[in-house]
Image (tube, helix red, strand yellow):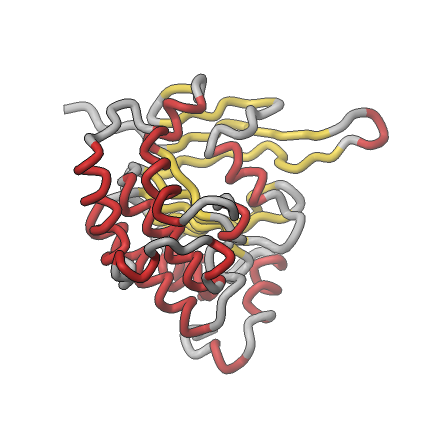
């Protein structure tokens, strides 16, 4: 039986913006494979190109150069792609319309699917998704996004993922706007997504400690390039590149118990 193609495959992918003296090389000659069902973290500081790479995975950007594929094929139709690849972003409030109730937007999200379920099934799936993130459906009846906290809104983003059941989740800094307790809860929900739906998860983060904790594979990005990659123990415990070493050194001492350098 032939092996399955990688869920994502990049071959010499580059992404530039602007031209001439104002050209910006956001992603430079990046190559990698991500296995179906893996948890992969793309780690780097601000401006390293990791969010641009995430948008390529989501089909929001087409690479300037190189070959990027999803399940062995180029991304040619965004709507079809979003049937299987969904995202969670840093700011949950930007992902919801402030003038519509949360429940109505969770239900409207099913409009992206090719085979939209019946109305009764949509209601059942939204209820089940809310309970999956420890929210009773009655708690959000008539509620608008501005009536909830940042942590609660992150739960709503995750509830949408539970409801839609995509094959891949691209999570761009999903815990950066919440406190440590809520951050731990969100990570637990994401691991629950992985276990219950068998999905591939790509974390985009500046936090190498988070990456070490959750990942099967880590990519370190700097100035648009992947400068180091491998399994978490190899990258985080035996770092080779100066950028990786700096990311580890930037972690507060109280959180460095996992490092045995």
- The image position of residue 74, as x and y in percent, is 43, 20
Above-or-below relation of 176 to 195: below
Q: Among all residues in the image, which is located at the extreme top?
A: 76
- The image position of residue 83, as x and y in percent, is 34, 29
Q: Among all residues in the image, which is located at the extreme left?
A: 1
Residue in view at x 65 percent, y 53 percent: 46
Asked if one can make out residue 42 in the rendered structure from this viewpoint, the answer is: no
| Front one among 117 and 38 | 117
Q: Among all residues in the image, which is located at the extreme front?
A: 142
The image quadrant of residue 135 is bottom left
- The image position of residue 178, as x and y in percent, is 49, 66
Q: Among all residues in the image, which is located at the extreme bottom?
A: 254
Above-or-below relation of 135 to 89: below
Asked if one can make out residue 240 in the rendered structure from this viewpoint, the answer is: yes
Residue in view at x 53 percent, y 30 percent: 60
Which quadrant would the N terminus be assigned to in this image?
A: top left
The image quadrant of residue 24 is top right
Q: How many marks?
A: 0
Residue in view at x 53 percent, y 63 percent: 177
- The image position of residue 69, as x and y in percent, is 42, 25
| Front one among 109 and 188 | 109
| Front one among 142 and 70 | 142
Residue in view at x 83 percent, y 25 percent: 20
Above-or-below relation of 8 to 100: above
């Amino acid at each position: 039986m032939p092996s399955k193609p990688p869920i994502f495959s990049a071959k010499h992918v580059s992404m530039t913006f602007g031209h001439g003296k104002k050209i910006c090389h956001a992603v430079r000659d990046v190559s990698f494979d991500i296995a179906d069902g893996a948890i992969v973290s793309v780690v780097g500081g601000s401006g390293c190109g990791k969010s641009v790479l995430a948008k390529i995975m989501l089909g929001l950007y087409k690479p300037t150069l190189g070959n990027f594929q999803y399940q062995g094929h180029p991304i040619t139709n965004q709507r079809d792609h979003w049937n299987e690849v969904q995202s969670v972003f840093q700011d949950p409030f930007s992902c919801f319309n402030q003038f519509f109730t949360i429940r109505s937007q969770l239900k409207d999200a099913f409009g992206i699917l090719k085979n939209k379920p019946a109305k009764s099934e949509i209601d059942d799936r939204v209820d089940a998704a809310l309970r999956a993130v420890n929210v009773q459906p009655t708690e959000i009846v008539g509620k608008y996004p501005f009536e909830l906290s940042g942590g609660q809104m992150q739960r709503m983003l995750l509830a949408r993922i539970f409801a839609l059941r995509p094959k891949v989740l691209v999570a761009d800094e999903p815990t950066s706007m919440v406190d440590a307790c809520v951050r731990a809860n969100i990570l637990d929900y994401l691991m629950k997504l992985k276990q219950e739906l068998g999905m591939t998860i790509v974390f985009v983060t500046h936090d190498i400690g988070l990456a070490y904790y959750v990942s099967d594979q880590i990519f370190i990005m700097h100035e648009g390039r992947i400068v180091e990659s491998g399994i978490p123990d190899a990258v985080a415990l035996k770092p080779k590149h100066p950028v990786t070493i700096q990311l580890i050194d930037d972690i507060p001492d109280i959180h460095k118990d996992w490092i045995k350098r």
